[in-house]
Amino acid sequence: MSGSTRAPVSRGSFVPTAREAWLTAIGIFVLALAVRAWAASMITFPVPEDTAYYFGVARNLLEGRGLVSDALWSYQTPPLVLPRPAFEIWLPLPTFLAAGPMALLGPTFRAGQVAAVAIGALVPVLAWRLAADVAAETALPMGRARTLAIGTGIAACVYGPLVTHSALTDSTMPFTVLALAACLLMTRLLRDPRGARAGDPRLLALGALLGLAALTRNEAIWLALVWAALGWWDPGRQRPDRGIRVRRILVPAAVAMAVFAPWVLRDLLVFGTPLPGQAASNALSVTGYDVFAWQDQPTLARYLAQAPAALVGARIDGLWHNVVLVLIVPGIPVGLIGLVSLPWAGRGDALRPLAALSVLIFAIATLVFPVSTRWGTFLHAAGPVHVLLLVVCIRALDMAIARLGRRLGWTRPVAWLGPLLVVGAATPLMLLSVATLGNLAGETDQRHRDLARVLALSGERPAMDRTPVISDHPVWAAEAWRIPSLALPDETPSSVMDLARTFGARLLVTSTDDDDRWPAILSQGGPDAACFEPVSLLDPEMGAVPPSLEDVRVYRIGCP
Protein backbone atom coordinates (compact mmCIF):
# COMPACT_ATOMS: atom_id res chain seq x y z
CA MET A 1 0.00 0.00 0.00
CA SER A 2 1.45 3.37 -1.01
CA GLY A 3 1.66 6.28 1.38
CA SER A 4 3.78 9.19 2.44
CA THR A 5 7.33 8.39 3.43
CA ARG A 6 8.11 11.87 4.62
CA ALA A 7 10.34 11.85 7.67
CA PRO A 8 9.11 13.54 10.81
CA VAL A 9 10.00 17.19 11.11
CA SER A 10 13.28 17.70 12.88
CA ARG A 11 12.59 19.07 16.33
CA GLY A 12 16.19 19.83 17.28
CA SER A 13 16.66 19.93 21.01
CA PHE A 14 13.48 21.89 21.72
CA VAL A 15 10.97 19.42 23.10
CA PRO A 16 9.35 21.12 26.09
CA THR A 17 7.81 18.83 28.65
CA ALA A 18 4.07 18.82 29.14
CA ARG A 19 4.56 20.64 32.45
CA GLU A 20 6.65 23.38 30.84
CA ALA A 21 4.19 23.74 27.96
CA TRP A 22 1.19 24.07 30.26
CA LEU A 23 2.90 26.52 32.61
CA THR A 24 4.07 28.63 29.68
CA ALA A 25 0.65 28.66 28.06
CA ILE A 26 -1.05 29.59 31.34
CA GLY A 27 1.50 32.33 32.05
CA ILE A 28 1.07 33.89 28.62
CA PHE A 29 -2.72 33.64 28.87
CA VAL A 30 -2.78 35.37 32.27
CA LEU A 31 -0.56 38.21 31.02
CA ALA A 32 -2.65 38.62 27.88
CA LEU A 33 -5.84 38.55 29.94
CA ALA A 34 -4.58 41.31 32.23
CA VAL A 35 -3.55 43.56 29.33
CA ARG A 36 -6.85 43.05 27.52
CA ALA A 37 -8.92 43.56 30.66
CA TRP A 38 -7.21 46.90 31.16
CA ALA A 39 -7.82 47.83 27.51
CA ALA A 40 -11.50 46.91 27.82
CA SER A 41 -11.81 49.09 30.93
CA MET A 42 -10.73 52.09 28.83
CA ILE A 43 -13.44 51.56 26.21
CA THR A 44 -16.85 52.42 27.62
CA PHE A 45 -18.99 52.49 24.48
CA PRO A 46 -19.16 50.03 21.57
CA VAL A 47 -16.98 51.53 18.85
CA PRO A 48 -16.78 51.20 15.89
CA GLU A 49 -20.31 50.54 14.69
CA ASP A 50 -19.88 46.87 13.88
CA THR A 51 -19.01 46.36 17.56
CA ALA A 52 -22.28 48.06 18.51
CA TYR A 53 -24.15 45.85 16.04
CA TYR A 54 -22.96 42.55 17.53
CA PHE A 55 -23.57 43.84 21.05
CA GLY A 56 -27.02 45.21 20.20
CA VAL A 57 -28.20 41.94 18.67
CA ALA A 58 -26.96 40.06 21.75
CA ARG A 59 -28.93 42.42 23.99
CA ASN A 60 -32.06 42.01 21.87
CA LEU A 61 -31.64 38.25 21.98
CA LEU A 62 -31.45 38.24 25.78
CA GLU A 63 -34.49 40.51 25.97
CA GLY A 64 -36.49 37.86 24.13
CA ARG A 65 -36.73 39.73 20.83
CA GLY A 66 -34.68 37.21 18.86
CA LEU A 67 -31.84 37.78 16.41
CA VAL A 68 -32.89 41.26 15.30
CA SER A 69 -31.37 44.71 15.06
CA ASP A 70 -33.08 48.08 15.36
CA ALA A 71 -30.71 49.47 12.72
CA LEU A 72 -31.45 49.09 9.03
CA TRP A 73 -27.94 49.95 7.85
CA SER A 74 -28.14 48.50 4.33
CA TYR A 75 -30.96 48.28 1.81
CA GLN A 76 -29.57 45.61 -0.52
CA THR A 77 -31.09 42.49 1.09
CA PRO A 78 -34.83 42.10 1.70
CA PRO A 79 -36.93 42.11 3.79
CA LEU A 80 -36.53 45.83 4.49
CA VAL A 81 -38.37 46.02 7.80
CA LEU A 82 -37.78 47.31 11.31
CA PRO A 83 -36.77 45.70 13.53
CA ARG A 84 -34.47 44.04 11.05
CA PRO A 85 -33.55 40.33 11.02
CA ALA A 86 -29.88 40.38 11.90
CA PHE A 87 -26.82 39.20 10.00
CA GLU A 88 -27.79 39.51 6.36
CA ILE A 89 -24.05 39.66 5.62
CA TRP A 90 -22.21 39.39 8.92
CA LEU A 91 -22.28 36.21 11.00
CA PRO A 92 -23.63 35.43 14.47
CA LEU A 93 -20.91 33.73 16.52
CA PRO A 94 -19.52 36.96 18.06
CA THR A 95 -23.03 37.82 19.24
CA PHE A 96 -23.55 34.35 20.75
CA LEU A 97 -20.20 34.60 22.54
CA ALA A 98 -21.04 38.03 23.96
CA ALA A 99 -24.51 36.87 25.02
CA GLY A 100 -23.06 34.25 27.41
CA PRO A 101 -21.54 36.60 30.01
CA MET A 102 -24.29 39.14 29.35
CA ALA A 103 -26.85 36.54 30.45
CA LEU A 104 -24.98 36.14 33.74
CA LEU A 105 -23.76 39.67 34.43
CA GLY A 106 -26.45 41.76 32.79
CA PRO A 107 -27.13 42.99 29.23
CA THR A 108 -24.41 45.64 29.23
CA PHE A 109 -21.48 46.34 26.95
CA ARG A 110 -19.11 45.73 29.87
CA ALA A 111 -20.50 42.21 30.24
CA GLY A 112 -20.19 41.59 26.50
CA GLN A 113 -16.52 42.58 26.67
CA VAL A 114 -15.82 39.70 29.07
CA ALA A 115 -16.06 37.16 26.26
CA ALA A 116 -14.04 39.37 23.91
CA VAL A 117 -11.23 39.70 26.46
CA ALA A 118 -11.09 35.97 27.19
CA ILE A 119 -11.11 35.01 23.52
CA GLY A 120 -8.52 37.63 22.64
CA ALA A 121 -6.23 36.32 25.39
CA LEU A 122 -6.04 32.99 23.57
CA VAL A 123 -4.31 34.57 20.57
CA PRO A 124 -0.90 35.07 22.27
CA VAL A 125 -1.03 31.46 23.46
CA LEU A 126 -1.58 30.27 19.90
CA ALA A 127 1.15 32.64 18.66
CA TRP A 128 3.54 31.09 21.20
CA ARG A 129 2.64 27.60 20.00
CA LEU A 130 3.13 28.63 16.38
CA ALA A 131 6.54 30.14 17.13
CA ALA A 132 7.48 26.99 19.06
CA ASP A 133 6.69 24.96 15.95
CA VAL A 134 8.92 27.27 13.90
CA ALA A 135 11.74 26.95 16.44
CA ALA A 136 11.45 23.17 16.47
CA GLU A 137 11.29 22.93 12.70
CA THR A 138 14.43 25.02 12.26
CA ALA A 139 16.26 22.99 14.93
CA LEU A 140 17.23 25.99 17.02
CA PRO A 141 19.24 25.35 20.18
CA MET A 142 17.12 25.01 23.30
CA GLY A 143 17.77 28.52 24.63
CA ARG A 144 17.08 30.31 21.35
CA ALA A 145 14.05 28.13 20.66
CA ARG A 146 12.48 28.80 24.03
CA THR A 147 13.24 32.52 23.76
CA LEU A 148 11.75 32.73 20.27
CA ALA A 149 8.56 30.96 21.32
CA ILE A 150 7.98 32.66 24.67
CA GLY A 151 9.13 36.02 23.31
CA THR A 152 6.55 35.79 20.52
CA GLY A 153 3.81 34.99 23.02
CA ILE A 154 4.73 37.92 25.25
CA ALA A 155 4.99 40.26 22.27
CA ALA A 156 1.52 39.17 21.14
CA CYS A 157 0.23 40.11 24.60
CA VAL A 158 1.07 43.77 23.97
CA TYR A 159 0.84 44.01 20.18
CA GLY A 160 -1.62 46.82 19.49
CA PRO A 161 -3.78 45.39 16.67
CA LEU A 162 -4.32 42.22 18.72
CA VAL A 163 -5.09 44.10 21.95
CA THR A 164 -7.59 46.69 20.73
CA HIS A 165 -9.84 44.19 18.98
CA SER A 166 -9.77 41.98 22.07
CA ALA A 167 -11.67 44.70 23.92
CA LEU A 168 -14.46 44.84 21.31
CA THR A 169 -17.45 42.60 20.72
CA ASP A 170 -16.72 42.10 17.04
CA SER A 171 -15.64 39.23 14.79
CA THR A 172 -11.90 39.94 14.60
CA MET A 173 -10.57 37.94 17.54
CA PRO A 174 -12.98 34.97 17.34
CA PHE A 175 -11.99 34.52 13.70
CA THR A 176 -8.31 34.89 14.56
CA VAL A 177 -8.46 32.24 17.29
CA LEU A 178 -10.30 29.74 15.10
CA ALA A 179 -8.04 30.38 12.09
CA LEU A 180 -4.83 30.00 14.12
CA ALA A 181 -6.07 26.85 15.80
CA ALA A 182 -7.04 25.38 12.44
CA CYS A 183 -3.66 26.23 10.90
CA LEU A 184 -1.81 24.60 13.82
CA LEU A 185 -3.95 21.50 13.42
CA MET A 186 -3.39 21.42 9.66
CA THR A 187 0.37 21.31 10.20
CA ARG A 188 0.07 18.36 12.55
CA LEU A 189 -2.19 16.44 10.20
CA LEU A 190 0.18 16.98 7.30
CA ARG A 191 3.15 15.79 9.36
CA ASP A 192 1.40 12.55 10.30
CA PRO A 193 -0.04 10.61 7.35
CA ARG A 194 -1.60 8.18 9.82
CA GLY A 195 -3.96 10.96 10.86
CA ALA A 196 -6.23 10.27 7.92
CA ARG A 197 -8.61 7.67 9.28
CA ALA A 198 -12.23 8.62 8.74
CA GLY A 199 -12.84 8.88 12.47
CA ASP A 200 -9.54 10.54 13.38
CA PRO A 201 -10.42 13.08 16.10
CA ARG A 202 -8.07 15.65 14.58
CA LEU A 203 -9.95 15.60 11.29
CA LEU A 204 -13.20 15.98 13.20
CA ALA A 205 -11.73 18.84 15.23
CA LEU A 206 -10.52 20.58 12.09
CA GLY A 207 -14.01 20.34 10.62
CA ALA A 208 -15.49 21.83 13.78
CA LEU A 209 -13.01 24.71 13.66
CA LEU A 210 -13.83 25.38 10.00
CA GLY A 211 -17.56 25.33 10.74
CA LEU A 212 -17.22 27.70 13.69
CA ALA A 213 -14.99 30.01 11.65
CA ALA A 214 -17.73 30.10 9.00
CA LEU A 215 -20.09 31.36 11.73
CA THR A 216 -17.66 34.18 12.44
CA ARG A 217 -16.53 35.68 9.11
CA ASN A 218 -17.07 34.94 5.43
CA GLU A 219 -13.28 34.66 5.02
CA ALA A 220 -13.57 31.19 6.51
CA ILE A 221 -14.04 29.96 2.94
CA TRP A 222 -10.38 30.79 2.28
CA LEU A 223 -9.37 28.80 5.34
CA ALA A 224 -11.25 25.79 3.96
CA LEU A 225 -9.63 26.23 0.54
CA VAL A 226 -6.18 26.32 2.13
CA TRP A 227 -6.81 22.97 3.78
CA ALA A 228 -8.28 21.48 0.61
CA ALA A 229 -5.16 22.50 -1.34
CA LEU A 230 -2.65 21.38 1.29
CA GLY A 231 -4.51 18.18 2.07
CA TRP A 232 -4.67 17.18 -1.59
CA TRP A 233 -1.34 18.49 -2.91
CA ASP A 234 0.69 17.46 0.11
CA PRO A 235 3.81 19.66 0.17
CA GLY A 236 5.89 16.70 1.35
CA ARG A 237 8.31 14.73 -0.76
CA GLN A 238 5.65 12.15 -1.67
CA ARG A 239 1.92 12.45 -1.91
CA PRO A 240 -0.09 10.09 0.29
CA ASP A 241 -2.37 7.73 -1.58
CA ARG A 242 -5.64 8.96 -3.03
CA GLY A 243 -7.80 7.51 -0.28
CA ILE A 244 -5.93 9.38 2.42
CA ARG A 245 -6.19 12.63 0.51
CA VAL A 246 -9.91 12.20 -0.07
CA ARG A 247 -10.55 11.49 3.62
CA ARG A 248 -8.44 14.48 4.61
CA ILE A 249 -10.79 16.74 2.71
CA LEU A 250 -14.20 15.09 2.96
CA VAL A 251 -14.25 14.39 6.69
CA PRO A 252 -13.56 17.98 7.80
CA ALA A 253 -15.87 19.26 5.06
CA ALA A 254 -18.74 17.09 6.31
CA VAL A 255 -18.25 18.20 9.91
CA ALA A 256 -17.95 21.86 8.92
CA MET A 257 -21.12 21.67 6.85
CA ALA A 258 -22.97 20.03 9.74
CA VAL A 259 -21.91 22.87 12.06
CA PHE A 260 -22.83 25.58 9.56
CA ALA A 261 -25.99 24.01 8.10
CA PRO A 262 -28.46 25.34 10.73
CA TRP A 263 -27.38 28.88 9.96
CA VAL A 264 -27.72 28.29 6.23
CA LEU A 265 -31.28 27.09 6.83
CA ARG A 266 -32.04 30.14 8.97
CA ASP A 267 -30.78 32.52 6.27
CA LEU A 268 -32.79 30.67 3.64
CA LEU A 269 -35.98 31.03 5.68
CA VAL A 270 -35.40 34.67 6.69
CA PHE A 271 -33.70 36.21 3.65
CA GLY A 272 -34.66 33.78 0.92
CA THR A 273 -31.03 32.88 0.18
CA PRO A 274 -28.44 30.75 1.97
CA LEU A 275 -25.63 33.02 0.77
CA PRO A 276 -24.55 36.50 1.90
CA GLY A 277 -25.68 38.08 -1.36
CA GLN A 278 -24.60 41.55 -0.34
CA ALA A 279 -20.97 40.37 -0.32
CA ALA A 280 -21.14 40.15 -4.11
CA SER A 281 -22.70 43.62 -4.27
CA ASN A 282 -19.88 45.02 -2.13
CA ALA A 283 -17.43 43.94 -4.82
CA LEU A 284 -19.26 46.34 -7.17
CA SER A 285 -18.97 49.37 -4.90
CA VAL A 286 -17.74 52.55 -6.51
CA THR A 287 -17.49 54.41 -3.20
CA GLY A 288 -17.62 53.21 0.38
CA TYR A 289 -20.99 54.90 0.79
CA ASP A 290 -22.52 52.45 -1.68
CA VAL A 291 -23.16 50.14 1.25
CA PHE A 292 -25.84 52.66 2.37
CA ALA A 293 -27.35 53.15 -1.10
CA TRP A 294 -31.13 53.44 -1.29
CA GLN A 295 -31.97 54.30 -4.92
CA ASP A 296 -28.55 54.23 -6.61
CA GLN A 297 -27.46 50.74 -5.59
CA PRO A 298 -24.32 49.01 -6.94
CA THR A 299 -24.73 47.23 -10.28
CA LEU A 300 -22.32 45.57 -12.66
CA ALA A 301 -23.11 48.08 -15.44
CA ARG A 302 -22.46 51.02 -13.12
CA TYR A 303 -19.23 49.46 -11.93
CA LEU A 304 -17.91 48.75 -15.43
CA ALA A 305 -18.87 52.23 -16.59
CA GLN A 306 -15.87 53.57 -14.66
CA ALA A 307 -12.74 54.40 -16.60
CA PRO A 308 -9.97 51.77 -16.48
CA ALA A 309 -7.86 54.25 -14.54
CA ALA A 310 -10.52 54.36 -11.81
CA LEU A 311 -10.60 50.57 -11.55
CA VAL A 312 -6.82 50.39 -11.28
CA GLY A 313 -6.71 53.35 -8.91
CA ALA A 314 -9.21 51.72 -6.56
CA ARG A 315 -6.94 48.70 -6.24
CA ILE A 316 -3.88 50.86 -5.66
CA ASP A 317 -5.78 52.68 -2.91
CA GLY A 318 -6.89 49.36 -1.44
CA LEU A 319 -3.33 48.04 -1.56
CA TRP A 320 -2.01 51.13 0.19
CA HIS A 321 -4.72 50.93 2.84
CA ASN A 322 -4.23 47.24 3.55
CA VAL A 323 -0.43 47.29 3.59
CA VAL A 324 0.31 50.62 5.21
CA LEU A 325 -2.72 51.52 7.32
CA VAL A 326 -3.68 48.01 8.46
CA LEU A 327 -0.44 46.02 8.60
CA ILE A 328 2.40 48.51 9.07
CA VAL A 329 1.32 51.66 10.90
CA PRO A 330 -0.63 50.11 13.84
CA GLY A 331 2.33 48.01 14.92
CA ILE A 332 5.37 49.58 13.35
CA PRO A 333 8.07 48.31 13.01
CA VAL A 334 6.76 44.76 13.47
CA GLY A 335 4.56 44.73 10.37
CA LEU A 336 7.25 46.30 8.21
CA ILE A 337 9.98 43.88 9.34
CA GLY A 338 7.60 40.95 8.99
CA LEU A 339 6.61 41.88 5.45
CA VAL A 340 10.16 42.50 4.30
CA SER A 341 11.53 39.29 5.83
CA LEU A 342 8.56 37.04 5.01
CA PRO A 343 10.14 35.52 1.86
CA TRP A 344 12.98 33.89 3.81
CA ALA A 345 12.07 34.00 7.51
CA GLY A 346 8.53 32.78 6.78
CA ARG A 347 9.42 29.58 4.99
CA GLY A 348 8.72 26.08 6.26
CA ASP A 349 5.89 23.69 7.01
CA ALA A 350 5.02 25.30 10.34
CA LEU A 351 3.94 28.58 8.74
CA ARG A 352 2.69 27.28 5.40
CA PRO A 353 -1.06 27.09 6.22
CA LEU A 354 -1.07 30.48 7.93
CA ALA A 355 0.98 32.10 5.16
CA ALA A 356 -1.34 30.69 2.47
CA LEU A 357 -4.40 31.90 4.38
CA SER A 358 -2.89 35.34 4.86
CA VAL A 359 -2.08 35.71 1.17
CA LEU A 360 -5.60 34.68 0.18
CA ILE A 361 -7.30 37.03 2.64
CA PHE A 362 -5.09 39.93 1.59
CA ALA A 363 -5.37 39.30 -2.15
CA ILE A 364 -9.16 38.89 -2.21
CA ALA A 365 -9.76 41.94 -0.04
CA THR A 366 -7.40 44.06 -2.13
CA LEU A 367 -8.30 42.92 -5.64
CA VAL A 368 -11.97 41.91 -5.38
CA PHE A 369 -13.15 44.36 -2.70
CA PRO A 370 -10.82 47.34 -3.23
CA VAL A 371 -13.41 49.90 -2.10
CA SER A 372 -15.04 47.98 0.75
CA THR A 373 -11.65 47.03 2.16
CA ARG A 374 -11.02 50.69 2.99
CA TRP A 375 -14.09 50.48 5.24
CA GLY A 376 -12.88 47.47 7.25
CA THR A 377 -13.13 44.30 5.15
CA PHE A 378 -9.46 43.43 5.51
CA LEU A 379 -9.02 45.16 8.87
CA HIS A 380 -11.38 42.76 10.65
CA ALA A 381 -9.98 39.68 8.90
CA ALA A 382 -6.33 40.60 9.40
CA GLY A 383 -5.81 39.03 12.85
CA PRO A 384 -4.11 35.89 11.46
CA VAL A 385 -1.94 38.07 9.21
CA HIS A 386 -0.78 40.14 12.18
CA VAL A 387 0.22 36.97 14.03
CA LEU A 388 2.11 35.70 10.98
CA LEU A 389 4.04 38.96 10.66
CA LEU A 390 4.78 39.00 14.39
CA VAL A 391 6.25 35.49 14.31
CA VAL A 392 8.24 36.23 11.17
CA CYS A 393 9.51 39.55 12.58
CA ILE A 394 10.85 37.95 15.76
CA ARG A 395 12.30 35.04 13.79
CA ALA A 396 14.04 37.50 11.43
CA LEU A 397 15.46 39.45 14.37
CA ASP A 398 16.67 36.20 15.92
CA MET A 399 18.46 35.29 12.69
CA ALA A 400 19.98 38.76 12.35
CA ILE A 401 21.18 38.88 15.95
CA ALA A 402 22.67 35.38 15.72
CA ARG A 403 24.53 36.35 12.53
CA LEU A 404 25.78 39.56 14.11
CA GLY A 405 26.93 37.65 17.15
CA ARG A 406 28.95 35.24 15.06
CA ARG A 407 30.53 38.10 13.13
CA LEU A 408 31.49 40.00 16.29
CA GLY A 409 32.51 36.90 18.21
CA TRP A 410 29.96 37.24 21.01
CA THR A 411 30.41 34.55 23.64
CA ARG A 412 27.10 34.96 25.45
CA PRO A 413 23.68 34.36 23.86
CA VAL A 414 21.51 37.43 23.38
CA ALA A 415 18.50 35.80 21.71
CA TRP A 416 16.28 37.71 24.13
CA LEU A 417 17.22 40.98 22.42
CA GLY A 418 14.82 40.47 19.49
CA PRO A 419 11.66 39.91 21.56
CA LEU A 420 12.73 42.70 23.91
CA LEU A 421 12.99 45.15 21.01
CA VAL A 422 9.57 44.11 19.71
CA VAL A 423 7.90 44.39 23.12
CA GLY A 424 9.59 47.75 23.72
CA ALA A 425 8.37 49.10 20.39
CA ALA A 426 4.89 47.57 20.55
CA THR A 427 3.92 48.61 24.07
CA PRO A 428 3.87 52.42 23.61
CA LEU A 429 1.94 52.10 20.35
CA MET A 430 -0.54 49.77 22.04
CA LEU A 431 -1.05 52.24 24.88
CA LEU A 432 -1.62 55.02 22.36
CA SER A 433 -4.06 52.91 20.32
CA VAL A 434 -6.10 51.97 23.38
CA ALA A 435 -6.15 55.57 24.61
CA THR A 436 -7.26 56.81 21.17
CA LEU A 437 -10.03 54.23 20.95
CA GLY A 438 -11.06 54.97 24.52
CA ASN A 439 -11.33 58.68 23.75
CA LEU A 440 -13.42 57.93 20.67
CA ALA A 441 -15.71 55.72 22.75
CA GLY A 442 -16.13 58.40 25.40
CA GLU A 443 -16.78 61.15 22.89
CA THR A 444 -19.31 59.05 20.99
CA ASP A 445 -21.13 58.14 24.19
CA GLN A 446 -21.21 61.78 25.31
CA ARG A 447 -22.47 62.96 21.93
CA HIS A 448 -25.43 60.60 22.01
CA ARG A 449 -26.24 61.41 25.63
CA ASP A 450 -26.14 65.15 25.00
CA LEU A 451 -28.19 64.90 21.82
CA ALA A 452 -30.90 62.83 23.50
CA ARG A 453 -31.07 65.34 26.36
CA VAL A 454 -31.19 68.41 24.11
CA LEU A 455 -33.86 66.92 21.84
CA ALA A 456 -35.93 65.96 24.87
CA LEU A 457 -35.75 69.53 26.19
CA SER A 458 -36.69 70.91 22.75
CA GLY A 459 -39.69 68.61 22.44
CA GLU A 460 -38.27 66.49 19.60
CA ARG A 461 -37.62 63.33 21.61
CA PRO A 462 -41.20 62.01 21.21
CA ALA A 463 -40.67 61.95 17.44
CA MET A 464 -37.57 59.80 17.99
CA ASP A 465 -39.47 57.43 20.24
CA ARG A 466 -42.34 56.90 17.81
CA THR A 467 -40.67 56.79 14.39
CA PRO A 468 -37.36 55.74 12.85
CA VAL A 469 -34.52 58.25 12.74
CA ILE A 470 -32.33 58.58 9.66
CA SER A 471 -28.69 58.81 10.70
CA ASP A 472 -25.21 58.67 9.21
CA HIS A 473 -24.36 56.35 12.13
CA PRO A 474 -27.50 54.21 12.29
CA VAL A 475 -26.16 51.42 14.53
CA TRP A 476 -24.91 53.83 17.18
CA ALA A 477 -28.24 55.68 17.04
CA ALA A 478 -30.19 52.45 17.47
CA GLU A 479 -28.13 51.16 20.36
CA ALA A 480 -27.53 54.44 22.22
CA TRP A 481 -31.14 55.63 22.04
CA ARG A 482 -32.89 52.21 21.73
CA ILE A 483 -34.92 53.40 18.74
CA PRO A 484 -35.29 52.16 15.14
CA SER A 485 -32.85 53.86 12.80
CA LEU A 486 -32.14 54.03 9.08
CA ALA A 487 -28.82 54.56 7.32
CA LEU A 488 -28.47 57.90 5.57
CA PRO A 489 -27.70 57.25 1.89
CA ASP A 490 -25.16 59.51 0.22
CA GLU A 491 -27.78 60.54 -2.32
CA THR A 492 -29.98 63.51 -3.20
CA PRO A 493 -32.52 65.10 -0.83
CA SER A 494 -35.26 63.64 -3.01
CA SER A 495 -33.89 60.14 -2.48
CA VAL A 496 -33.67 60.66 1.27
CA MET A 497 -37.23 62.00 1.27
CA ASP A 498 -38.34 58.84 -0.50
CA LEU A 499 -36.61 56.80 2.21
CA ALA A 500 -38.31 58.87 4.92
CA ARG A 501 -41.75 58.43 3.35
CA THR A 502 -41.23 54.69 2.96
CA PHE A 503 -40.46 54.16 6.64
CA GLY A 504 -42.23 57.14 8.18
CA ALA A 505 -39.05 58.83 9.45
CA ARG A 506 -39.42 62.34 10.90
CA LEU A 507 -35.88 63.27 11.99
CA LEU A 508 -32.45 63.18 10.32
CA VAL A 509 -29.24 63.26 12.33
CA THR A 510 -25.95 63.80 10.53
CA SER A 511 -22.45 65.14 11.09
CA THR A 512 -20.51 67.86 9.33
CA ASP A 513 -17.17 66.16 9.90
CA ASP A 514 -17.85 63.26 7.53
CA ASP A 515 -16.70 63.37 3.91
CA ASP A 516 -20.06 62.55 2.34
CA ARG A 517 -22.37 65.12 0.78
CA TRP A 518 -24.60 65.58 3.82
CA PRO A 519 -25.59 68.01 5.16
CA ALA A 520 -23.81 70.40 2.74
CA ILE A 521 -25.99 69.21 -0.14
CA LEU A 522 -29.00 70.97 1.40
CA SER A 523 -27.40 74.37 0.84
CA GLN A 524 -27.46 73.74 -2.91
CA GLY A 525 -31.25 73.80 -3.03
CA GLY A 526 -33.02 71.65 -5.59
CA PRO A 527 -36.03 69.35 -5.31
CA ASP A 528 -37.04 68.50 -1.74
CA ALA A 529 -34.12 70.34 -0.13
CA ALA A 530 -36.64 72.58 1.65
CA CYS A 531 -38.22 69.50 3.25
CA PHE A 532 -35.38 69.38 5.81
CA GLU A 533 -35.89 71.97 8.54
CA PRO A 534 -32.95 72.55 10.93
CA VAL A 535 -33.60 71.81 14.59
CA SER A 536 -31.85 73.96 17.17
CA LEU A 537 -29.39 72.08 19.39
CA LEU A 538 -29.14 74.90 21.91
CA ASP A 539 -29.15 73.50 25.43
CA PRO A 540 -31.54 75.71 27.45
CA GLU A 541 -29.75 74.78 30.67
CA MET A 542 -26.31 75.72 29.28
CA GLY A 543 -27.41 78.60 27.09
CA ALA A 544 -25.22 77.19 24.30
CA VAL A 545 -24.77 74.20 22.04
CA PRO A 546 -22.89 71.45 23.96
CA PRO A 547 -19.32 71.03 22.69
CA SER A 548 -20.01 67.41 21.76
CA LEU A 549 -22.73 68.55 19.33
CA GLU A 550 -20.83 71.25 17.45
CA ASP A 551 -20.41 68.97 14.43
CA VAL A 552 -23.92 67.48 14.62
CA ARG A 553 -26.89 68.65 12.58
CA VAL A 554 -30.50 67.58 13.13
CA TYR A 555 -33.33 68.18 10.65
CA ARG A 556 -37.06 67.79 10.96
CA ILE A 557 -38.30 65.98 7.84
CA GLY A 558 -41.51 67.16 6.20
CA CYS A 559 -42.30 69.30 3.19
CA PRO A 560 -44.05 72.65 3.84
Image: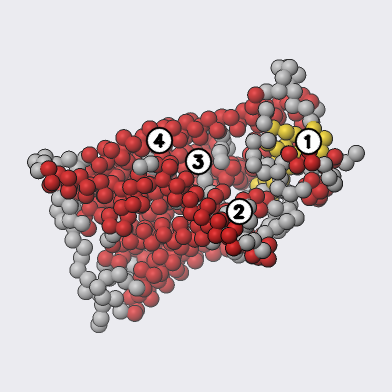
Mark 4 lies on residue: 429
Badge 2 or badge 4: first in the primary sequence: 2
Q: Nearer the viewer, residue 267 or 355?
A: 355
Check disc 3 and report its element: helix, strand or loop.
loop
Q: Amino acid at mark 4?
A: Leu
**Residue at 62% across, 51% down:** 288
Badge 3 or badge 1: first in the primary sequence: 3
Tag shown at residue 168: 3
Image location of residue 141, percent across then percent down: 15, 50
Q: Nearer the viewer, mark 4 or mark 3?
A: 4
Q: Nearer the viewer, residue 560 or 29?
A: 560
Q: Amino acid at mark 1?
A: Tyr
Check disc 2 and report its element: helix, strand or loop.
loop
**For residue 277, what is the image quadrant?**
bottom right
**Residue at 57% across, 53% down:** 372
Residue 493 visible in image: yes
Residue 503 visible in image: no
Mark 2 lies on residue: 87
Dividing the image into 4 quarters, which one contains the C terminus? Answer: top right
Disc 2/disc 3 C-alpha distance (Å): 18 Å
Dividing the image into 4 quarters, which one contains the N terminus? Answer: bottom left
Label 3 packing within 10 angstroms: few (<14), some (14-19), many (20+): many
Mark 1 lies on residue: 555
Disc 4/disc 3 C-alpha distance (Å): 18 Å
**For residue 427, what is the image quadrant?**
top left
Image location of residue 175, percent across then percent down: 46, 52
Badge 2 or badge 3: first in the primary sequence: 2
